[in-house]
Image: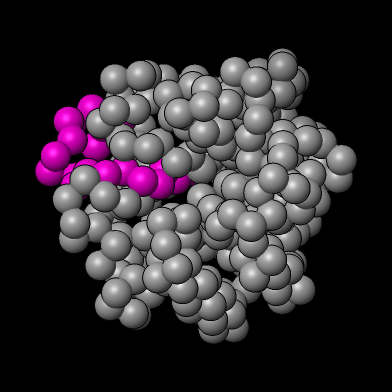
Amino acid sequence: MTARKGILVRHECRHGDLPLLIVILGEIREKVRTMSRTIRILSWNVNGIRAAAKKGFLELPASESPDILCIQETKARPEQVTKALLSPPGYASFWNAAQKKGYSGVAVYTKETPIHVETSLGVRKFDEEGRFIRLDFKEFSVINVYFPNGKMNAERLRFKMEFYETFLDYVQDLRATIPRLCFLGDVNTAHREMDLARPKENSNVSGFLPEEREWIDKVVAAGYVDTFRDLNKDLVQYSWWDLKSRARERNVGWRIDYVFVTAEMRDAVKNAFILTDVMGSDHCPVGVELEFS
């Protein structure tokens, strides 16, 4: 019995070889049992999936090959998009669209079939906007969320804050039965001053208001980890830039897209990053790499 590049090759089996064969087979079983599994997850507000498709959206799953790709602000129903967008090679997709056409919406592309899919937060006014989708897998659950923008007026700011509180209550309840949770998406709030280029000028603007930032404080205090900041303490990178002012050219941006995980799965996070070079939207993708044994 010899081994070539990790492959066992049998020449002949003599009685004296059997103990060695048993040992080798045992070692192989142990390696398979302890083999780690890496899961790469990306999140991207595409600002309209059909518009993004014309700008090369499908190049992202082809080049980055995420195991799970969560997108926000699809602005489309599944029946309104091409087959290529519904089922890129190697992926199945799951959608939750808003009742209002051309508005909001989330979708998840995944290589692995989920155990369960949920699209309701349990509050009608939130569910009607298609902002939430949850997929349960063997190791963990991933929740893709497009949080409301509060810039339009005081009413929408109240709506945003109500959504925030409802969502946190939801994940806290879910965590009791599924402790390994990952929620990600466009949170529409920069947490710290380092998370936007001009904090002073935006201190009274929705997206950096004290009450919005305090909600993220509350999320962190409840045991949810901002993966990017946890692994990149001092790195200044942004995930959104204003299109009208061509802010991306000057890198005058905001970090408002996040990947949070529960403290119970913090050790599984091996990398957290922002793909600032990816174009096609006013946002760029953010992501993590998780490792499970």
- Answer left or right for 47 relative to 26: left
Q: How far across and down, in percent of the image, does residue 229 sit?
A: 77, 48
- Answer left or right for 166 relative to 207: left
Residue 20, image quadrant: top right
Residue 83, image quadrant: top left
The segment highlighted magenta reads 66-88
Q: Which residue occupies the foreground of this view, 65 or 138? A: 65
Quadrant where the image shows the N terminus: top right
User: From the viewer's perspective, is residue 102 above or below residue 277?
Assistant: below
User: From the viewer's perspective, is residue 46 above or below residue 138?
Assistant: above
- Answer left or right for 39 relative to 129: right
Residue at image position (48%, 39%) is 44
User: From the viewer's perspective, is residue 286 above or below residue 149?
Assistant: above
Q: Which residue occupies the foreground of this view, 85 or 141? A: 85
Residue 275, image quadrant: top right
Q: How many marks?
A: 0
Residue at image position (59%, 54%) is 205
Residue at image position (45%, 28%) is 244
Residue at image position (72%, 16%) is 4
Q: How far across and down, in percent of the image, does residue 53 sit?
A: 30, 25
Is residue 53 visible from the viewing direction of this image?
yes
Q: How far across and down, in percent of the image, does residue 136 sit?
A: 45, 63
**In the image, is residue 264 part of the stretch drawn in magenta?**
no
